[in-house]
Image (spheres, helix red, strand yellow):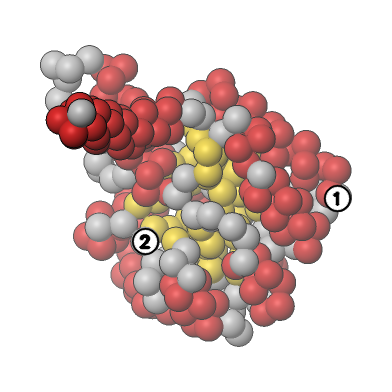
Amino acid sequence: MHRDILYLKGKYFLFILVYLFLIPVQTSAEQSLKPTISIIIDDLGYTLEEDLRALSLPGPVAYAILPHAPHTKRISLIATQRGKDILLHQPMQAMEKNQYLGPGALTLNMTREEFLKTLNINMSNVPNLIGINNHMGSLLTRHPGHMQWLMDTIKSSGQFYVDSLTSNYSVAAKIAKKNNIPYLTRDVFLDNRQNPEYILNQFKELVKVAKRKGSALGIGHPHPSTVEVLSQVLHNVDKYGVQLIGLKSLIIKQKNRKQYAQGPRSSGTGL
Ligand SMILES: [Zn+2]
């Protein structure tokens, strides 16, 4: 009798042990199969209250901060304290509306020396950045020479580039790829109109792209309507059949997918 109980206890113990080992394997397998979305909030540094509200969005949302705004340093530090990913939101010359570039912009008429000096000052103004994305830039991102200067700096700092894709003629991603620099490109702008219904539809579009491609990257701004909609949907992101992941995880995911698509014998360099 006593022996039987010991035997049963041993059997259950073994069962529980196997079960505990199986759960994490199953969860990570499920997670890797799930489509993923990633989100960047751009243009931070000017509106403290709105920026702080944006920083309270749940999950690994990334924040792109302008280099010479009144609250640049404060927002970078608060974002760091909250464990958020930070990008330098680098102003670059656009085809039009260049009055919105703000200080620290990179422009076509700069010499290489002026370009690199401006970029380095901007990078040192945003503590704890892990990458760079462009603010505006529909003109500058078309120019391979200037994009090469940009990628030289990103490469030596070990960071990555996110092409906000403000122009369909941008060569930024192509130049990053050529230089073997990790890069991402924007799929959906979430809030070209500050209307909750529009923003929710754009979020649904992001989910749709993620389900088609496996992952999708959205860009929004710290407008109250954007933060309100994102706060609601991100708290219930499972409901949409996607998982929210950070930018570094997205880079790894895209790299793995490309290597898989290229086959095991490929060198698989770049992204
Ligand atoms: Zn911007």
Of residue 88 and residue 49, the one placed in the foreground of this image is: 49
Report the side of 24 relative to 34 (left or right). Answer: left
User: Residue drawn 60% across and 30% down?
Assistant: 241
Is residue 167 visible from the viewing direction of this image?
Answer: no
Name the residue that disc number 1 marks: 195
Of residue 175 and residue 237, the one placed in the foreground of this image is: 237
Q: Is residue 9 above or below residue 235?
A: above
Residue 238, picture quadrant: top right
Q: Is residue 71 above or below residue 145?
A: below
User: Residue drawn 31% across and 17% down?
Assistant: 261
What's the amino acid at mark 1? Asn
Quarter of the picture holding the C terminus: top left
- Residue 73's x, y, as percent? 49, 82
How busy is the neighbourhood of tag 1: few (under 14 within 10 Å), some, or many (20 plus)? Answer: some
User: Residue drawn 84% across and 49% down?
Assistant: 196
Is residue 241 visible from the viewing direction of this image?
Answer: yes
Name the residue that disc number 2 marks: 130
Q: CA distance from mark 2 to mark 1?
A: 31 Å
Where disc 2 sits, the SS reads loop
- Residue 66's x, y, as percent? 55, 70
- Residue 187's x, y, as percent? 57, 36
Report the side of 232 relative to 170 (left or right). Answer: right
User: Residue drawn 35% across and 33% down?
Assistant: 23
N-terminal of the two: label 2 or label 1?
2
What's the amino acid at mark 2? Ile
Residue 189, picture quadrant: top right
Where disc 1 sits, the SS reads loop
View extreme (front): residue: 1
